[in-house]
Amino acid sequence: MTTPQAVSLPSTAPVQVRRSMTTQQRQRMWGWIFLSPWIVGFLAFTGFPMVASLIFSFTNFKIGEPLEWAGLTNWARLFSDNNTVNALFVTFRFALVSVPIIVLVPLLMATLLNSKVVRAKPVLRVLFYIPYMIPAISGVFIWQSFLNGQTGWLNRLLRLIGFQELPNWLFDPRSLTWGLVLIGLWGVGNAMLTMLAAMQGVPTELYEAAEVDGANPFTKWYRITLPLISPVILYNLVLSVIGLMQYFIVPYVLSNVTRSNPETNFFNLNLYRTAFQFGEMGFASAQAWFIFLIALALTLIIFGTSRRWVYYAGER
Amino acid sequence: MATAAKSQPTTAAHVSTAPAYNSQLRRFAIGTLVTLFAFMIALVYLSPLGNMAMVALSSPAQLSITGDDPVIPMLPQTFEYEGESYEVFSVPLTDGTVRDLALSKKGRQSSEFIDPANPSAPPLVWEGIWRTLAPVRSVSFAWENFGIAWEAINFPRLFRNTLIIAVAGMIGTLLSCICVAYAFARFPIPGKNILFIILIGTIILPGQVTLIPTYAFFASIGWTNTWLPLIVPHFFANAYNVFLLRQYFMTLPRELDEAAMIDGANPLQILLRVIIPQSFPVIIAVAVFHFVWAWNDYFGPLIYLLGAPELQPVSVGVQVFNFQYGPSPELVQATSMMTLVLPVIIFLLAQRVFMRGVVVTGVDK
């Protein structure tokens, strides 16, 4: 059978032709029909726009104006435009601090919920997951209040414990990063849940065997749990890196409150401003492709190193 | 633990059972401690919600108090008597007791107070400067903040907009993702594995890279400032939900499909009469996921509905309002609270379905 025939059939197929098809061919035809929404959607909303934005990145594209070729100007500007260079720096510096934390914290939460001795696990699991359900936009406003230097509960709590010199988290450039990390902690629910499910899938025989060998709880966690759930850790690591490249709502809200602070000039926010405030769609496209290439490179690096630290059972 | 050991009968068995009993008790104690610890962490983790609720229930007067402002919303207590309102202070009396009295006549060196418990009695004269007295505060929740915020952001309109966007998108997601997942689960499409990897790959594709041409396209066909860019793309399937549905469809026995096929059903009829009736749990999961996602979605409505405030959904409406009313923290917190109630309730009601869905998309890959 030839593919073009099978593809063109749905539109023209007269009943007689269909009868002459084998069951296999008919099944294929139905398969393509059911698949078509995604094929069309992928081409229209992913494939085509990706190519188009690559092309736009070499133009001075502005909405409502004719396309004008710009060569490599936009790409060169990536490295000369202060805002963009700063945005890249801000994003990477934050990623270095926050990625380890937003992978480690859900891992610890999952470990706690997976512990045999803890009771009321379903309740705890729900409590730990609730923040993930809270709309990001509400979350930012809630944390803004919580991190308020004077009246926020965090500083009240810290004062209560005896700390004196407390930062005004989101307004002080030195503590801003930590404020953002704290806000990010409300986004770990999914990671926690997937890690927990992976932990529950670890065969108990392994732990029993380790106990026979006299392993303590930490050794069991480090030598059995961690390696066996490492594919899920890898997956969450990749997702959090990609997520940071798209970090938007928090810096967007904060920069409107604290007035275009260079400290909250994250890459995606800078891109948004370039495209929708200054209308420089061409330059914004170059930024988008640039961050895409960086994300791709990071993903490949993570996958590349994964052979060393990720355990794949069986045939993989 | 010692008592537990003692309560064991002093027979030969004592020697062997007591340690087991002891270790059981130790386990119980450790379990309690670790559970308490876990709940403490959860409490701290969720404490911003407490902060939100308390600010949302504070009156502007309370929030303007600086210094030793209490955590729970409180206002200076007043005492109404014969049409007059008097502030209440805690007054140390000469006999060593401290009583809450209403200040009826302010004086420089001495002031007159009346006893709220017995207002008709002659006023009590207190020697001292009344400004040094501590005002008595009582808990006072400003529930009216929610009403004010509800009206100010026009919540019914925002809610209606969100509902239309979410439900229309949900229908699109269900229709398209069910079909595509069915294709991946059941049909011998050439190159299916590669197509599936591409589909999953779109999960980790940063959205920016398609943003500008998509936006330009919608702008060029006049769809900006309408709901269409937020609804129509959902009729073309997305990776998460296709994956979730496909995993479920793969677990359904093929024998039923085959039986229906022998009875002369075509694949569409099999989908409608065999597959879908067996898949309600996962279909509900996808519907719920989409609804919550659409409720929380912010970036899409922000860029596409910038010029049409009357069409904006809750997420954007609340943000726009809060930028205007930034100095009214109680309204900012009240609107934030109103925004999060529905998704959290949906999650609590559908948590089982929800968590299973998260696990399937997060672990099985």
Image: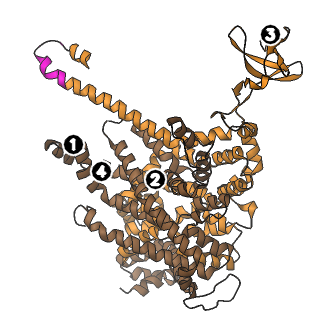
Chain colours: A brown, B orange
Q: Earlier in the sequence, mark 4 or mark 2?
A: 2
Q: Which residue ends up furthest to the left in the rendered image? A: B12
Q: Is residue B237 visible?
A: no
Tell me if residue B243 comes above or below residue A148 in the rendering: below
* Residue wearing tag 2: A188
Residue B244's image quarter? bottom left
Indicate yes or no whether the magenta region holds residue B12.
Answer: yes
Q: Which mark is residue A216?
A: 1
Gap in angstroms between the C-alphas marked 4 and 1: 20 Å
User: Looking at the figure, which quarter contains the C terminus of chain B?
Assistant: bottom left
Q: Earlier in the sequence, mark 4 or mark 1?
A: 4
Query: Mark 3 against mark 4, which lies toward the viewer?
Result: 3
A149 over B117 or under it: above or below: below
Image coordinates for residue A24, horizontal then vertical, percent: 35, 76
**Could you tell me which secondary element the residue under label 2 belongs to?**
loop
Q: Which chain is disc 2 placed on?
A: A
**Distance CA(mark 2)–CA(mark 1):** 28 Å
Foreground of the two, A163 or A178? A163
Q: Which mark is residue B118?
A: 3
Q: Where's residue B43, x and y in %? A: 49, 38
For label 2, count other residues whose C-alpha is less than 10 Å away and answer few (under 14), some (14-19) or many (20+): many
